[in-house]
């Protein structure tokens, strides 16, 4: 399959940009429906126990209330094997904030008022909500997400550590954090009782996945569920799989056939019901020769899961393939707690795992007296440490060297606490970054050609190419990049291509997750274009059509495929107050072919900004007495804002990689966050001499 280079690589403006600026791009909650009811839930106020009584009479008497659903009267679900989806099916309470009832009313304000009038009586039981690595309930999961081995041992790491001239042995922690996309999770559900069809306008990263999950839970044929989601206001992983809110809206619509049900989570509910990144306790031990070459890596992780449903973040997997060593051990252990289930958050596993691994490497650099950039270069592997396979491409060393040159690293005084400027301690730090090049099977696409005499003759085309695939654009620019891929594959101008996405009426597509979207959907579209040109040539007739599917990669299993990067950060810490600022950040990445420089830079800077937020701000504070996240809004849960970002730059190595996919691209949605927090922590140590082994860092950490 050969793709022409005319469209890919151009900084094509976002196709839907004008709609978003004008406010005409419809998000899930904005789709017009006739006579909607508004849903507001009643959530449990205990972390563990049973509902013994629910009094809904006062709520039902409120003018405008149509129904109050509880476990006593809600429609029965066909499949409750996934406990997260089993809403209002019994009286069990598994975590604080769980749905225990739902009010449906003519107005959203009425629904909220009525929900506050529902009286719930509980049999409260003892609960445990704090992560404790000494918990007697600690266990090893069968696998960690999505299907990695839980534990891995190579060589004899304990013996290597015993004989190592230099060792670093430390514990690192990361906080519980929550996804906070600007658009909350929203659903508009309509149940057509006559046809037995359910329609969902849903804010999701994958309409096909929502259709499959909801159909199974409700006992419907997959084709009887329509999911529509043309525009999504961010997700960061939280919308990568459906959650209980979608099932509740669908269940409510089934209870009031003919009346659409609209449900938008409040910001506070986002902290209860749609997942979060688990806190982690990470024990990292490095053994090295005096010259800094690693002889052993040990990375043992403890994290939490919900007692009622397992989620195992793959935190230590980062250390399996980053640096060369003949002796390595990685492990994962979970503590089941009476909390909501964790879920996906940007770069799950790699983001927290890289923090511990890359801060440990900085500590090794200090212990050996070797420059931290040079230390990483010395430990560059010739083949993948995890699989033994050759790399399809790996330009981490180039990223480190270019970043060091661009950041004027050679002028750096290696001594910590050596530079005080106007009352601020100034330091610089570095961390490496990697993220696997993922692609997911299961997508299909169709391309149709229609003659269009109205087209500008300068475009050199007699008509338009309609490309259909149920992909998702969650704000990344997927619609634009897929247009470029289709144009290249067809050998036409992007202006003659229209890509339709975000609807299960289109050919199915995999979910936008794991930085796999462009690779998976793009390869699928390229396959359809290849078949189209084989069948119709370059001069198709009106109505010409061809289908395509995600092709097998002939190089899969023959090469190790990942994107790489290097983060450089400058940190200023006020000598008196401990205030932390980050005046400069630079990320240099090697991520295959960059298909659209503008959207790529946006994604890389977004990831870096989220890493800055992880380093300095984000922490969900759980009250152990109640199991409640107390800072459950954007006034108290701090995220990095514009004023927190100084000079931030992202650039990339021009990397040719013909093995990853037909476009030669690698995912860029998550590589930007991986290692960013570590670079900031390392810079803070260089500035102050205070070693930060947990995030977020606060001014209290630096005031002695």
Image (spheres, rainbow, N blue to C red):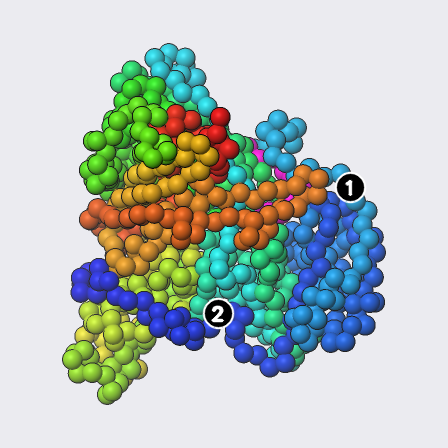
Q: Is residue 13 above or below residue 635?
A: below
Q: Is residue 548 magenta?
A: no
Q: Which region of the structure is painted magenta?
A: 329-344
Label 2 packing within 10 angstroms: few (<14), some (14-19), many (20+): many
Q: Quadrant of residue 186?
A: bottom right
Q: Quadrant of residue 552?
A: bottom left
Of 187 and 505, nearer the camera is 187
Q: Which residue is mark 2?
A: 27
Image side of residue 152 versus residue 534, left or right: right
**Which residue is depicted at the point 30% across and 47% down?**
647
- Seen as rendered, the residue at the extreme front is 422
Task: Give x and y (percent) for residue 392.
Answer: 25, 43
Task: Give x and y (percent) for residue 114.
Answer: 74, 67
Q: Is residue 238 visible?
A: no
Q: Which residue is mark 1?
A: 125
**Which residue is depicted at the point 44% across and 49% down?**
640
**Which residue is depicted at the point 40% across and 51% down?**
643
Image side of residue 440 versus residue 629, left or right: left
Q: Is residue 488 above or below residue 146?
A: below
Task: Give x and y (percent) for residue 614.
Answer: 45, 43
């Amino acid at each position: 399959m050969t793709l022409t280079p005319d469209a890919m690589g151009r900084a094509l403006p976002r196709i839907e940009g004008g709609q978003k600026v004008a406010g005409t791009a419809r998000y899930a909650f904005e789709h017009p429906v006739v006579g909607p009811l508004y849903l507001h839930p009643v959530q449990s106020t205990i972390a563990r126990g049973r509902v013994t009584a629910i009094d809904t009479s006062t709520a039902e008497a409120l003018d405008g209330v149509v129904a109050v659903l509880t476990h006593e009267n809600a429609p029965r679900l066909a499949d409750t094997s996934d406990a997260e989806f089993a809403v209002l099916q019994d009286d069990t309470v598994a975590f604080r904030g769980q749905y225990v009832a739902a009010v449906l009313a003519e107005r959203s304000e009425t629904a909220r008022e009525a929900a506050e009038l529902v009286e719930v009586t509980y049999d409260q039981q003892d609960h445990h909500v704090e992560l404790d690595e000494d918990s007697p309930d600690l266990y090893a999961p069968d696998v960690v997400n999505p299907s990695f081995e839980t534990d891995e041992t190579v060589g004899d790491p304990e013996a290597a550590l015993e004989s190592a001239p230099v060792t670093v042995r430390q514990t690192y922690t990361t906080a519980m954090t929550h996804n906070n996309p600007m658009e909350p999770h929203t659903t508009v559900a309509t149940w057509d009782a006559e046809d037995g069809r359910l329609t969902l306008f849903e804010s999701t990263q994958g309409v096909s996945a929502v259709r499959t999950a909801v159909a199974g839970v409700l006992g419907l044929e997959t084709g009887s569920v329509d999911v529509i989601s043309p525009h999504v206001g961010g997700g960061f992983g939280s919308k990568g799989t459906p959650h209980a809110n979608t099932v509740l809206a669908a269940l409510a619509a089934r209870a009031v056939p003919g009346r659409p049900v609209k449900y938008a989570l409040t910001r506070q509910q986002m902290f209860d019901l749609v997942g979060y990144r688990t806190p982690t306790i990470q024990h990292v031990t490095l053994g090295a020769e005096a010259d800094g070459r690693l002889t052993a890596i040990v990375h043992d992780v403890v994290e939490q899961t919900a007692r009622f449903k397992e989620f195992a973040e793959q935190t230590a997997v980062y250390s399996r393939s980053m640096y060369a060593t003949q002796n390595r051990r990685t492990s994962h252990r979970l503590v089941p707690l009476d909390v909501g289930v964790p879920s996906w958050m940007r770069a799950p596993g790699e983001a927290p795992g890289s923090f511990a691994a890359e801060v440990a490497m900085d500590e090794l650099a200090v212990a050996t007296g070797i420059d931290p950039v040079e230390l990483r270069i010395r430990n560059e592997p010739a083949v993948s440490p995890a699989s033994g396979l050759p790399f399809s491409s790996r330009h981490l060393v180039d990223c480190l060297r270019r970043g060091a040159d661009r950041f004027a690293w050679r002028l750096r005084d290696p001594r910590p606490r050596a530079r005080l400027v106007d009352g601020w301690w100034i330091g610089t730090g570095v961390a490496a970054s990697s993220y696997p090049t993922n692609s997911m099977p299961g997508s299909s696409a169709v391309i149709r050609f229609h003659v269009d005499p109205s087209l500008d003759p300068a475009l050199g085309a007699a008509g338009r190419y309609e490309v259909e695939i149920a992909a998702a654009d969650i704000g990344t620019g997927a619609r634009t990049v897929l247009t470029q891929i289709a144009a290249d594959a067809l050998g036409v101008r992007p202006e003659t291509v229209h890509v339709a996405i975000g609807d299960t009426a289109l050919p199915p597509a995999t979910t936008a997750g794991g930085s796999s979207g462009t690779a998976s959907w793009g390869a699928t579209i390229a396959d359809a274009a290849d078949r189209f040109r084989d069948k119709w040539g370059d001069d198709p007739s009106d109505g010409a059509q061809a289908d395509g599917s995600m092709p097998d990669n002939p190089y899969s299993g023959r090469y190790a495929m990942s994107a790489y990067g290097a983060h450089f950060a400058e940190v200023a810490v006020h000598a008196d107050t401990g205030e932390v600022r980050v005046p400069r950040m630079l990320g240099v990445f090697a991520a295959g072919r960059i298909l659209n420089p503008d959207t790529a830079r946006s994604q890389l800077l977004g990831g870096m900004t989220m890493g800055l937020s992880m380093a300095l701000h984000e922490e969900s504070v759980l009250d152990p007495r109640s199991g409640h996240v107390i800072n459950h809004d954007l006034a108290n849960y701090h995220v990095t804002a514009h004023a927190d970002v100084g000079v931030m730059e992202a650039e990339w190595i021009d990397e040719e990689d013909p093995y990853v996919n037909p476009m030669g691209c690698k995912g860029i949605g998550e590589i930007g966050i991986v290692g960013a927090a570590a670079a900031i922590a390392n810079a803070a140590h260089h500035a102050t001499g205070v070693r930060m082994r947990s995030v977020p860092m606060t001014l209290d950490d630096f005031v002695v």
